[in-house]
Image: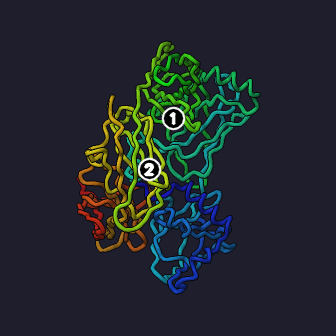
Amino acid sequence: MRRFLPAAVVAALVLGLLAQSSAPSPDKTKEHPEAQCVVAGRVVTAAEGTPLKSARVGLVPERLGWETFSQSYATTSESDGRFLLKDVAPGRYQFFANREGFVEQQYESESTDDGAVLGLTPGQKISEVLFRMTAAAVITGRVNNEDGEPMTGVQVAALRRPTEEEKEEEDPSPRHKREFRSVATSPTDDRGQYRIFGLKPGEYYIRATDSGESGNASQLGQMVRETLGSEYAPLYYPGVVQVGHAQVVSVKPGDEVQTDFSMQRIKTVEIAGRVIGPGGKRAWVNLAPSGEDDFGSRYNNVTDENGNFRLKGIPPGSYVIVVYQLEEGNNYEAHTRQKVEVGGENIESLNISLSSSTNFQGRVTVAGPGSVTLDQIGVAFIPIDEDGPPSREAHVKKDGSFEITLVRDGNYAIRAWGLDHEWYVKSARLGPDDILEKGLQVEKGTSGARLEVVVSSASAQVEGSVIDGDQAVTGAHVRLKADPETPYNRFRAANARTDQTGHFSVAGLAPGNYRVMARFRPSPGSDSLKSDPQVVTLSEHDRKTVQLTVTKPQAE
């Protein structure tokens, strides 16, 4: 359950708000004007304290949803760095500033860390907010081939290891665990040069991958390149194949660091095979490096009328092959996943079987008071095993009905999205089976019984504070997860951050037992301080309060 927006999404939202107007819409101010809040402050450079003009300052609800989207506010700073946001509704907000050439700055953050939530009570006026913006860094360089000639269309990516907090808050699906996160990418131009900008100070691994594309190639020329495939292995700076042997590139505020590559031509192989299964339709076969997104890889081919395919220019490595077929509505649907280890020899007879699948019809109903827009909800089966089949999902219709099709054999958890933050999935049953507790095991011959999903607004809430001694902790990460946690209930995990008073609040929790723990990093690069976990038991409509104390680890 993701509680905070990625920086790119937040920035895009602020740009959209500024394009409309920096003033709030009339319906935010016409009722109870005495309850509206005012937030003012300055934006300056972190290095010299120089005022920054035209910085974008935004307030976005802590939990952005359909019901809170309109309660977002944005403005730009003046020549003296000052900004003013008026007629702001009370509430809890993500609060930040961004500007070209600088790292996005969160409220109450130390340097470039995550910062805190801003909590506003009715009629509150805050006037001395100070955003100290850090100059962004740049990594640039040139990519040549083994003859020293520039290479065009090489994708160069800056990667970093996620923090402990990010690992806790990422998608709980085992397939989306990432050892590294791609921060930004840049293609090389006709001179073989690339430029990755807007980087936070820190440590990065730089990876170069030949995309097989050329900016000035004709359509026929590009087809020839795609047919040949890549003859170069992806490299990590300073020119190694394994990330474990790579050199970390460290950048400070405002740095421009050069990292050049010389791509190594290697022997690539071909993978030929056949897709076998029901349907008799042509399929799209897609090959992606293991641990990366499947859809959209450049290693792909369409089967012929007999199901045969051939992939060319494949460097050695670990891959996942996914087969898609064109289904109703002209959508390509994933049918199966299979791991493939590629060495130095061609693979000539890879058979991929499309086993029979099951369709599940279902209905979403509402328990108790309140109403929900059913056709904003989606229901998904998520495989709980890393090597499991593709996930399957469906959008709910206005009458509450849905159908999840092409469900392959495997072990699944159920997940719903699109619910307002006070709603939760109360039950999900397939016949007599409770799949919230035991999951869904699909095996050959499984009956496509009717799935009954019940949603409710009778959710619970946990709020509280995080302290260090007798001091409130601003910007602490608070994590709630089911106790005990199983592969089937881990999607109920929730995250929050404390505000300027050390307070946090998490709503929309399903009844049950939860372990609550806080984590706080006193300064960038330092070890995190953790609280002892507390267990809370929640019933419908419960509102419980906890106090978490972060403590320094004992010296060994």
Image point 61% across, 36% down: which residue? 155
Q: Position of residue 445 (x, y in %)?
A: 33, 29
User: The residue tagged with tag 2: helix, strand or loop?
Assistant: strand
Above or below: residue 242 compared with residue 80: above
Q: Position of residue 379 (x, y in %)?
A: 42, 48
Residue 267 appears anywhere in the view: no
Above or below: residue 356 compared with residue 464: above
Mark 2 sits on what residue? 401
- Image quadrant where one finds the N terminus: bottom left
Give the mark nearest the N terminus, 2 or 1: 1
Check disc 2 and give the amino acid type.
Ser
Residue 17 location, quadrant:
bottom right
Camera-side residue: 246 or 443?
443
Q: Position of residue 154 (x, y in %)?
A: 64, 33
Camera-side residue: 19 or 128?
19
Image point 43% across, 55% down: which residue? 2
Mark 1 sits on what residue? 333
Q: Is residue 225 left or right of residue 165?
A: right
Residue 246: mark in rendering = none
